[in-house]
Image: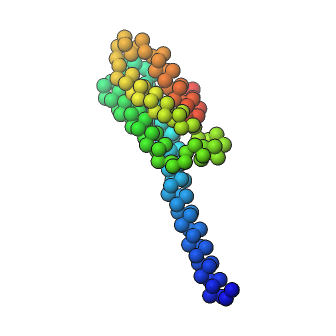
Amino acid sequence: MTDAERIVWGALAGVSIYIVGQLLSKFLIEPLHELRKTVGEVRFNLAFYAPTIHTPIGRSKEASADAQQALRENSCNLISKLHAVPIYSVVRHLSFGVLPERKAIEKAAAHLRALSTYVLQEGEKANNNSETVEKLVLRVELLLNLKPLE
């Protein structure tokens, strides 16, 4: 093999490695990072809106509407980010339990949507559903592998 051939093969190998790295980054690493960020946003919103979610007596229409909007966005973002990862089940097995199962994320998204309807309730109806709200929050935290807030 001549020096020119070695240079050409080396350049082709370098370009190939670069392309594979970019493909892995764009189609696997970035979508996984976005999914993990969305799980972090769920944690943030459950903590930030905790007074509105857990205390029906202190709810205002504005705070409830903001909490509902945030929870619904989190639900939709979880689903969209999950489906952006092409081989999620394979990647999840390689993550050593860091990533929740696909079904768990989908259930958490459904629970967030349900929770978003409860934050708009006021008065006696809200007080009667406080236990349901607490269970929904705990279920979302469990499904997304989030440490419950104390």
Q: Nearer the viewer, residue 67 or 97?
A: 97
Q: Nearer the viewer, residue 86 or 40?
A: 86
Q: Does the image show residue 117?
A: yes
- Which quarter of the image is occupied by the C terminus? top right
Q: Residue at the spot x=51%, y=35% of the render?
A: 105
Coordinates of residue 139 in the picture (x, y in percent): 53, 26
- Residue 136 lies, with reference to residue 77, above or below; the image says above
Counting labels gives 0
Could you tell me which residue is drawn at 53 percent across and 34 percent down? 103
Q: Position of residue 33 (x, y in %)?
A: 52, 49
Q: How far across and down, in percent of the image, does residue 147 sit?
A: 59, 32
Q: How is the image coloured?
A: rainbow
Position of the N terminus by quadrant: bottom right
- What is the residue that sits farthest to the right in this orientation? 1
Relative to 124, 20 lies left or right = right
Location of residue 65 by image quarter: top left
Considering depth in this image, is 132 or 109 the residue closer to the camera?
109
Up/down of 15 relative to 74, above or below: below
Residue placed farthest to the left in the image?
61
Q: Nearer the viewer, residue 114 or 44?
A: 114
User: Can residue 37 be seen by looking at this rendering?
Assistant: no
Q: Residue 148: image x %, image y %?
A: 57, 29
Residue at point 53% right, 58% down? Answer: 25
Q: Quadrant of residue 45?
A: top left
